[in-house]
Image (tube, rainbow, N blue to C red):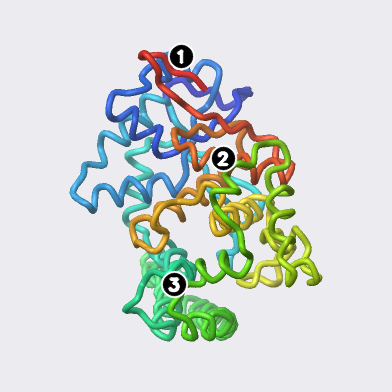
Amino acid sequence: MLPRYSELDDARPLVYIDQNVIDALRKQKLLGIIPNFHKDFRAVYSDETLKEIKRAADGGGDAKPFLQVLCELDAYHIRRVTDSNFVPQNEILIRSLSPFQLYDEYANNLNLEYLIESQTLINQKMMGGLPDMSLTEIEMHIINAFERLHDDILKPLDDLGEDGLPQAFIDNLKKNIESNQEEQLTKFKRLVKQSIAAFQTQVDSSELSILLQFRENLNVNPLRLNNITPPNVVEQIWQEVIKNDVMANSEVTIEQFFGVTEKSPAFPEHDNAPSDHVIGVYQILNMVGYYPDKKPHDSNSFVSTSSDMMHASMGYYCSAIMSCDDRFVKKTSAAYEFLNIPTHVLHVVEENKKVTC
């Protein structure tokens, strides 16, 4: 438990802290945030934060200063709840364990992250990245990650015999789980093949990335889009999009165009949550060129963009989200406004050693 946490009646609003704010605090900037923050708010972070910290550590950095910042903020960890098939639900688990403990837990259980990251390879290919990786190789990478995750499920069963459970019971349990896994794997392979097939022709038939084709076909100009100001940013961008004759004469709705769909291709039996819709809108805003991230084809930039989308989606579960990144703030604000999400998006700026939002 964290030192100033009261489990019984803690009505402090949750404020999601973007990674760049944590990094600024690590560099001894924005220090005015820390002293009294916990009195009125609960700072929160997610697995995406831990992923970015680990990425910094893998690149030769040190995870400890980032984690220490989270400790100083008395930060809580939030995670979307998943069902037995790893399908995310529209609820979160809030944990008050030490950031150091949660980081170690995360770093030692990466197979779910490998699966999630493998599925972003298709999007990276869309953006013009991964020139040396074929879509067939991407397909195999995704399937292998799924198999690796399911293999992990069986490992703890080997220890059940030490708890005095009959071996016949353990063997029967394994058999049932393996049977269910085989069914899930078959279904997952089919979905992956469908996703790959949807991109195959577009990727192989042009020297342009799908991103550039997308903007070229729609005749949208990032410079023009960036002159759009709130309110109704997404609706204004849609008016630019339907100036294209093909789009104007199509039956595509604004919701469909911006990825706001009830069902996910990956989990067709389950409804998308509003946090999933945030990812869809954020991604399309990036693709059409509304305050787009730079060099989306570059692996490092793509990874950062993917993290930004996840941070924005987790912000849905909070009262506010804080970031130092103007592009992130613009896209997240537009997505929340379109989806009627009440989360406040706070742009954190330090001027003359004073922090303003």
**Tags 2 and 3 touching, CB below 8 Å:** no
Residue indicated by mark 1:
36
Q: Which numbered circle lies on residue 330?
A: 2
- Tell me if I can see residue 136 in this picture: yes
Q: Which residue shows up at 54% across the image and 38% down it?
A: 329
Q: Which numbered circle lies on residue 125?
A: 3
Amino acid type assigned to the residue bearing label 3 in the image: Lys
Residue 324, located in which quarter of the rendered image? top left
Residues at marks 1 and 3, CA–CA distance in whole angstroms: 45 Å
Q: Which residue shows up at 38% across the image and 69% down it?
A: 129
Which tag, 2 or 3, sits closer to the chain's start?
A: 3
Q: Is label 1 in a helix, a strand or a loop?
A: helix
Amino acid type assigned to the residue bearing label 1 in the image: Asn
Residue 153 at what x, y percent from top left?
45, 70
Which tag, 1 or 2, sits closer to the chain's start?
A: 1
**Tags 1 and 3 touching, CB below 8 Å:** no
Residue 35 at what x, y percent from top left?
40, 14
- Tell me if I can see residue 185 in this picture: no
Marks 1 and 2: which is nearer the front?
2
Residue 71 at what x, y percent from top left?
36, 29
Q: Is label 2 in a helix, a strand or a loop?
A: helix
Which tag, 1 or 3, sits closer to the chain's start?
A: 1
Residues at marks 2 and 3, CA–CA distance in whole angstroms: 25 Å
